[in-house]
Amino acid sequence: MPDTADILRLESLQVHFPIQGGLFDHVLGRPAGAVRAVDGIDLNIGRGEIVALVGESGSGKTTVGRVITKLAQPTGGRMLFEGRDMTSVQGSSALRPYRHRVQMIFQDAYQALNPRHTVFDVVAEPLRSLRLVGNASQLTERVSEALASAGLNPPGDFFARFPHELSGGQRQRVVIAGALAVRPGLIVADEPVSMLDVSIRAQILQVLVALRDKHNMALLFITHDLPLAWLIADKIAVLYLGKLVEIGSADDITFNPRHPYTVALRNATPQVGANAGRAELRGLQGEVPSAARVPKGCRFHPRCPLAFDRCKQEEPPAIEVGPQHMSACWLAA
Amino acid sequence: MTSSSQEKPPLLDVKGLSVDYGLKGVPSRAIDSVSFALRAGEAVGLVGESGSGKTTTAMAIAGLLSPNARVSKGEVRYRGEQLPIDDDASMRPHRWSETSVVFQGAMNALNPVHRIIKQIAEPCMLKLGMSRGEATARARELLELVGIPADRGSAYPHELSGGMRQRVMIAMALACRPSIIIGDEPTTALDVITQAQILKLLGELRSRLGLALILITHDLSVVAECCDRVMIMYAGRIVEDGTVAEIFAQPKHPYTRLLIESIPNPASGKKMIRPIPGDPPNLVNRPSGCAFHPRCPSVMAVCATEVPSLDQFGRGRVACHLYRSSQEDKVAVHA
Amino acid sequence: MSESTVRYSQRGGARAMKGFLRQFLSYGGAQVGLVCLVFFLVVAPIPNILVGPLQTAINATGDFLAPPSGEHLLGTDEVGRDVLNLVVHGARISLTIALLATVISLIVGTTVGITAGYYGGRVDVWLMRLTDFFFVMPSFVLALVITPVVLEVMGRGGEILGFRPSPFVILVVIGLTSWAFVARIVRSQTLSLKERTFIDRARVAGSSNFSIMVRHILPNLVPQIAANGALVVAGAIYVETSLSFLGLGDPLQPSWGTLLSLAQRAGAASAGAWWYLGAPGVCVLTVSLSFVLIGNALDDTFNPRRRVIP
């Protein structure tokens, strides 16, 4: 039964980037390959829910975020936002209502801000582009409100500043203010704190959690850091080579992982605490294969310490291992 | 530690080191009176945020300060002998053969048009006076040492993954058989699993070759995994120094405590973290007194005026007015 | 979009401008270039006040090819006209042609370059083929082709925008042949700018392609456009001089190139009339050199190769 409480549903979403074959391949009629960046994922985000998408570089997590924010076009599957199919909607005017509801926060706030625009211009840009305000005083009011919600007080002090005049934490707050100025229903945050100093991270996380608590905004939090995902998210989805390997509540994934990859990820994460001491980091061997050459069967089997014959032949489906907890592993069957 | 250092000099002894940068003609202090000793085979983590001076400290020790930096005070002794860290020419024979550095961005540090084997062999030929054949043999040996099959040496940097490139950087750092390796955020650009592999490799090399390690990082959890001791830096000064076990069990400096509390830790079970208010200070306008006082929850009147010295406290050192036993009349004001 | 003015930014903008000027003026080349340029820019618009109306063979007052004297500071030409008078009037024509041609070149070049770089794909391929075509087009050949067309349209005596047919043709020809250089630079900059995250942010913020090009990419191209614009002016002055020298100029609106051409035809070189050849020659050299110096200083200011970061 379709759950109407979900703000966003991804159904076997697929993004393949074609590999440009050389002239030689073309003449010989060799098929050009494809990078299977996202290879069929199903994910639901509820209203006001914080979902963490965890994966290493090359797992396709950023591409998922770009598809949701309409910066990349999926090659297969469907994307439903508030029940409407948004898969093939394109063009800045057709997307206006969608942009109003879905916004994005970027990893590198310095890169995400035009060096020649003031803070006011940055935050006002979506309000102007999406025609959400009627006059200048309304615009100033909305910009002030957004800056204040992002923790930049008093807002007026920041209007005329340029990005290079701000600290790292303040820049990320400006990006956040720009995203929440339109009062969206969903914000995609792509590694929003990984470039920030440790002492600043908690401030930014607090702002993001407050958005959900106050305005019921849903958040897709993309990260490579499992403990961070546990801290902020209600639900964690673990991505490996373009496919979700495990999905479940933050506590289930952290304390009771059922997929060998999630276990490896957890074990590789350095632990803080008196008990941590010298625990051997039981990492995995090898590295993530290229998304242009996805292994047959379970895509994790070449690195999996528990792989057996079936894993090399058949790709495991998502198997329910607990309430709201799925693992794509034959061991879970 | 103090008793052992009286018997024979420590491997590396940094005393009252201060480094200034000339910013638009105005000298600004990047590190201020940094003192510590490193024993042979010891692994020390140097933790701080951007602008805390951790990289400047390491570059000063390695004699790799940029031309606009100046050592204004203090000295660095290697096995009791003073290093000419301020003098580019006389530092040259010491560089890489006593202290060598593994940098963060392996892609930028490697020349994209040369095979990696050549890039590893080059310092062997230049520094150790080896012939081409000897140097290539040494380079193959080094590659095996860092866990890369020697045959992969014919690859170009772009053909290797990030983790592999970082291994190449480590091999290059080991070329001249140094006794101290400085890792400047060696795993920051890497994934968690690759990071674990590299940290494990550094640990293994340390025990096999008896290397001392100075690990510069902003990530306390990395230090927790692979160091014996940790020094916390804030605004150019060491604010706390102690063993990893002590610092994580009983952090003394309020900054250390807040830093540890701001790391998500599922093992603790607590879900919310307490943010540290405010921004880290920059080089140019540093707060008076204790540089942390504007952000400190336990700030006292004295903190704004007097710089706390880094004093012995228990088995470690801490620079905080809270731990100066002489002052009994202090009143903690909680923000 | 409706009110795209940058408000509230006077404080920050003024500060940025001040920093820029301080940096720019710290280059010796920029100072020399600016002083020369300001001199010519002051002289060029007011020739009638400085040296009286343009002299012709009819109202010429001096001897033939008289060397510099108190009466004629730069001597006279073969029909007795004052060379100073001609050179000052020539400044107006030369600079106007060069600057207008540069404006054409910058507008066309920037538009083509941004469009090609931003959209990529087929648009890029075709626009760049067009650019290549104009890039290799010799200006003299183009002038020879266009001149009869213009003469046909406007007649031998007509004027367009205050220009007689030949200077107008030169203006158009320089504009058409120099924009390709600008387009290539703008395209390559756009290619790297459009990968920057702030372009993604603008798209998520709902900005249209046009708005992204105008409000995000263009302002970041200003340094390149300004620095190369100065070089385009320098080039335009040379091309104008060469075309006029080759006889495409108009004696009724003499530019420096026209003067050089007239001097050449009057046998100034063999007659030892160095003032007649030298005066316009030095002017051409000084003005284009000052534009090159300013262009290089702008380039250095905008892309400091040696920026000291601790």
Image: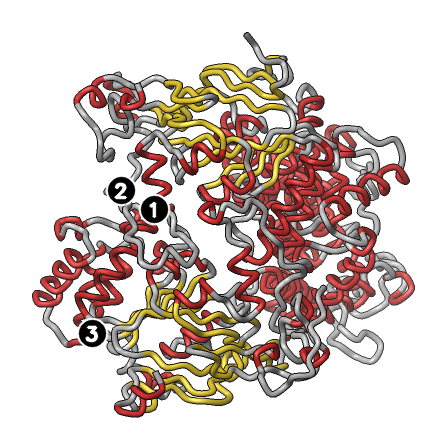
Residue occupying image coordinates x 38% and y 36%: A58
Number of numbered labels in the structure image: 3
Image coordinates of residue C202 in percent, x first then y, are 65, 37
Pointer 1 and pointer 2 on the same chain: yes
Residue designated by label 2: A284
In this view, B122 is above or below C239: below
Q: CA gap, disc 3 to disc 1?
A: 38 Å
Looking at the picture, how far across and down is residue B210, in whole percent? 20, 71
Residue at image x 37%, y 24%? A327
Mark closer to the chain start, 1 or 2: 1
Q: Is residue C36 left or right of residue B157?
A: right
Q: Position of residue A237 (x, y in %)?
A: 46, 30
Residue A14 in the image: above or below residue A147: above
> In which quarter of the view is residue B6 placed?
bottom left
- Label 1: which residue? A268
| Tag 1: amino acid | Ala
Q: Residue at x 55, y 57 (%)?
A: A197
Q: Which residue is at the front of the view, B247 or C51?
A: B247
Marks 2 and 1: in contact by CB < 8 Å? yes
SS category of the residue bearing label 3: helix
Q: Can you say whether A25 is above or below C58 in the image?
A: above
Q: Is residue B327 visible?
A: yes
Q: Please state which amino acid type lies under the numbered disc 3.
A: Leu
